[in-house]
Amino acid sequence: MQTLKVSSSQGEYNVYIGKGIRFKIDQLLPKSYEKILVITDDTIERLGYLQDICEPLHQSGANIYSYTVPSGEQSKSIQQYEQLLTYAIEKALDRHSLIIAIGGGVVGDLAGFVAATFMRGIDYIQVPTTILAHDSSVGGKVAINHPLGKNLIGSFHAPKGVIYDLETLDSLSLVEKRSGFAEVIKHALIRDEELLELLMNQVDSLENIDYDILHQAIYKGIEIKANIVAEDEREKGIRSYLNYGHTLGHAIETEAGYGKITHGEAIAIGMLFALRLSEKSYQIDLPIARIQQWFIRLQYPLKEIGSLQVDSLVERMKNDKKNKQGKIRMVLLEDVASPQLVTIQEDVLAAELSIFINEVIGNDKGN
Ligand SMILES: NC(=O)c1ccc[n+]([C@@H]2O[C@H](COP(=O)([O-])OP(=O)(O)OC[C@H]3O[C@@H](n4cnc5c(N)ncnc54)[C@H](O)[C@@H]3O)[C@@H](O)[C@H]2O)c1
Ligand SMILES: O=C(O)C(=O)C[C@@H](O)[C@H](O)[C@H](O)COP(=O)(O)O
Ligand SMILES: [Zn+2]
């Protein structure tokens, strides 16, 4: 088992990474709790992972309650959030209780937001089960969606620990591997050129991905994220770099309808667009053609953006949380691993997006 330490304003916490560690969750809690509410989704329950952690938790002597939400992005809703709060109140959880989120980023964001707001904030632990959640489980951003935009209702609330059992990744579908891998690529693009090269050279298919390489990349991704959030927990500066690809990506997710395209797939399209805009803005050469071909080999559904309207996407981007004084701001790359937060004029954005969409629809053969 490997352990990474993450510092936050609410105290330092450990990220445990290993195989089979869900079975000893009781030994990895930072302290004992009288009441624990475990929040998950129906896929995780069906796969038996909920049961796997509830057994050792029972043995710790705590009263365990569990609540299962439908799997998928639509559970990050105000309605689902309210139902969870009602359940927590009915079970008489108090300020000394613990919430455990076992699942992907949806469960983590939702349960984390319940923990952040129930009685003004109680402890919670993340037990990530997707590749994507190597990103979402660390750093304390918790949120639900509003029909008008992603994560518009949320908080910064650091977990008390992250218990990442890599064994659970074996049951992921191809589409979820693809989604999560996009955030691994993001971490490499913004911070680690060597990792990017390794991934581009070694990962040509997500179906047969070498698990040693994947686990190594996940570890590096967590390290990158942990270092950034430790320096800038509340996104006053460099944390915005973790939002690379998300300005357009979130607009695509909202505009397409939550759950129609995965988070990572939308972010992959957003990262490609940001690469194009970076090249034009800084008058530099970036390895765009190589990355785009790689994305096509990995079967990111780049052409999906062709079904969306430029004007509607730009309207969605006006709700992005990085914006300031009504201006859209995007993370661009001055070079690989050299990000900047840049204001983009709306007319330039619309024109570039239109060119991008036409090029992607033309070039992305068959995907
Ligand atoms: N808070 C953050 O910093 C942060 C970072 C990145 C993404 N996010 C958010 O995370 C969400 C996406 O997370 P996600 O991709 O993990 O989605 P998800 O939680 O919906 O999981 C994807 C699907 O995989 C299933 N699943 C989960 N673990 C599985 C396993 N081990 N085996 C088989 N199936 C499994 C789930 O039931 C779901 O159907 C988005 O809402 C995004 O906005 C948050
Ligand atoms: O941790 C961060 O900061 C990120 O931006 C990580 C992103 O991958 C993640 O999708 C996050 O939820 C986006 O945050 P938001 O502030 O744009 O909602
Ligand atoms: Zn993301």
Image (spheres, rainbow, N blue to C red):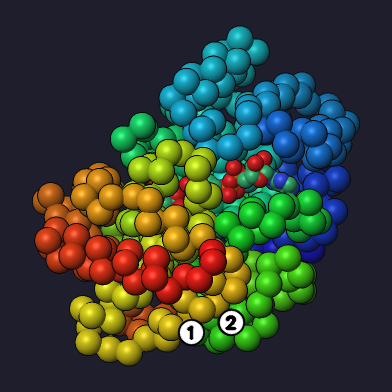
Residue at 80%, 47% in the rendered image: 22
Task: Tell me, yes or no, whether the two marked residues, 2 and 1, touch with CB atoms within 8 Å.
Answer: yes
Percent x, y for residue 157? 47, 42
Which quarter of the image is occupied by the C terminus? bottom right
Can you say whether 309 is above or below 363 in the image? above
The residue under label 1 is which amino acid type?
A: Arg
Can you say whether 148 is above or below 198 in the image? above
Which quarter of the image is occupied by the N terminus? bottom right
Query: Distance from label 2 to label 1 (Cα)?
Result: 9 Å
| Residue nearer the viewer, 315 or 145 | 315
Residue at 23%, 80% in the rendered image: 280
Instruction: Determine whether the residue tagged by mark 1 lies in a helix, strand or loop.
Output: helix
- The answer to whether one can see residue 224 in this image is no
Instruction: Determine whether the residue tagged by mark 2 lies in a helix, strand or loop.
Output: helix
Residue at 64%, 53% in the rendered image: 176
In the drawing, does residue 321 fall left or right of residue 137?
Answer: left
Q: Which residue is mark 1?
A: 290
Q: How many marks?
A: 2
Q: Mark 2 against mark 1, which lies toward the viewer?
A: 1
Percent x, y for residue 289? 43, 83
Q: Which residue is mark 2?
A: 200
| Residue nearer the viewer, 249 or 325 | 249
- The answer to whether one can see residue 301 in this image is yes
The residue under label 2 is which amino acid type?
A: Met
Residue at 44%, 35% in the rendered image: 144
Can you say whether 3 is above or below 289 in the image? above
Percent x, y for residue 42? 71, 31
